[in-house]
Image: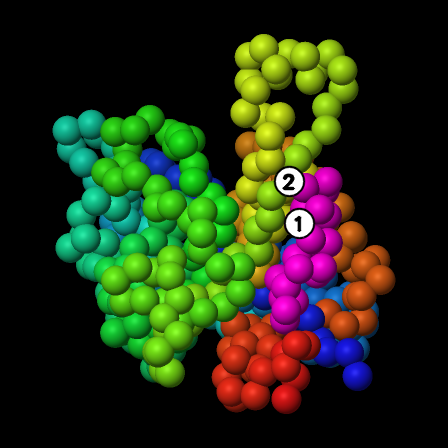
Amino acid sequence: MEGKIPIMMCIDVEPDGFFIDRTKPLPWKGYEGAYHYFSELRPRLEALTDSPVHFNWFYRLDPQVAETYGSPEWPITNYPKLVEDFLKAGDEISLHSHAYRWEKKINNWIEDLGNQKWVNYCVEMGFETYKRLFNRICESFRFGAYWISAETINFAEGLGAKFDLTVEPGFRMSKRFFPGELYSAPLPNYDHVPQEPYRPSRTDFSRPDPSRKEGIWIIPMSTGSVVYKFGNLETLYKKLFAPKELGSRPVTLNLARGINGFRSVMENLLASLNRPYFAMVVRSDVCGEFNSDPTDQENMRKNVEYIMSHPLGKRFIFSTPREAMSIMGYLNGKQTENGNS
């Protein structure tokens, strides 16, 4: 019998922006929109897969939230019905930490990734807040800003994390979306990170440690290399002024991504992975009424329709990290090619 193909749908629950105005604690309209969108999507996916659908909500419970909204608990306590509905549906409530610190010298936030003590403080605030709210330890974790370090993974593991869904194989971003002074550390190199789950070396998170029989799992986000095709004039222009854009580039299965890259990565992973799975992501603000890029929502709609119309759709199962790892056989030690025991 052909095995199930887990899909971990990760929604990063965040403010509607990055370097937000700390004097204006605005409601998270994107999060509100994400609640409605995925609540309406759930029964459609359940009908497609003939299985319960579990989403994964990765919450920001860190110092930027605490300073702007008065408490790191705000995204949970300000939206109690949303969280209650997610828990009733069997969704995973998880953590998505950033290292924003207010810097008076520039009158702005800085993503203080080069300050491991501060990073640890941000991560610990999230885990402690989570435990206080839910009376249990958070199992799944994603750091923000495309960044992670061995120290941070080890620290999160010490706080109880079982699954990290941060790394994006193939990425080595040469520049940030924001000025350099707003970040205190470069991006890590994900060039050689495996594309399937592994237990990491304690000194180099990008390298599996086969000797480890317990501890945290890294579940890489679903990525692939894509070569985009352009018209003759645009190709000529890029040859002259942007030659790098003509080569292959890494693409993550982000629901806001254009359909061609999204589709290409899905099909490549289905063909190449020993135990196929998908770890997809979208920021909550994509679902907001006033999202800055109107194409994001259209891309999300098209990508979801592509998933639902896929020939293998009946084999898809929308799951939490623990459920996905069990389906693939990683948690029972009896792995087969299709992840069944």
Q: Main secondary structure of the magenta part?
A: helix
Give the quarter of the image for residue 3.
bottom right
Q: Which residues are magenta?
A: 259-278
> Within the magenta stretch, is there residue 248?
no
Mark nearer the N terminus (2 vs 1)? 2
Q: Nearer the viewer, residue 261 or 129?
A: 261
Residue 213 shows in the view: yes
Side of 292 where 205 appears, left or right: left
Q: How many marks?
A: 2
Coordinates of residue 149 in the picture (x, y in percent): 29, 55
Q: Residues within 10 Å of mark 2 (few under 14, many from 20)?
A: some
The residue type indicated by label 2 comes to: Val
Residue 77 shows in the view: no
Q: Nearer the viewer, residue 113 or 338?
A: 338
Side of 235 where 77 appears, left or right: left
Which element carries disc 2, helix, strand or loop?
A: strand
Q: Nearer the viewer, residue 74 or 198?
A: 198
Residue at horizontal 38 percent and vertical 45 percent from the top: 189
Question: Distance between the Cα atoms at labels 2 and 1?
Answer: 7 Å
Are circles 2 and 1 on residues that touch, CB within 8 Å?
yes
Residue at horizontal 75 percent and vertical 57 percent from the top: 307
Coordinates of residue 1 in the picture (x, y in percent): 79, 83
Label number found at residue 226: 2
Q: Residues within 10 Å of mark 1 (few under 14, many from 20)?
A: many
The residue type indicated by label 1 comes to: Val
Residue at horizontal 68 percent and vertical 41 percent from the top: 261
Residue at horizontal 84 percent and vertical 62 percent from the top: 311
Coordinates of residue 256 in the picture (x, y in percent): 62, 43
Residue that mark 1 sits on: 265
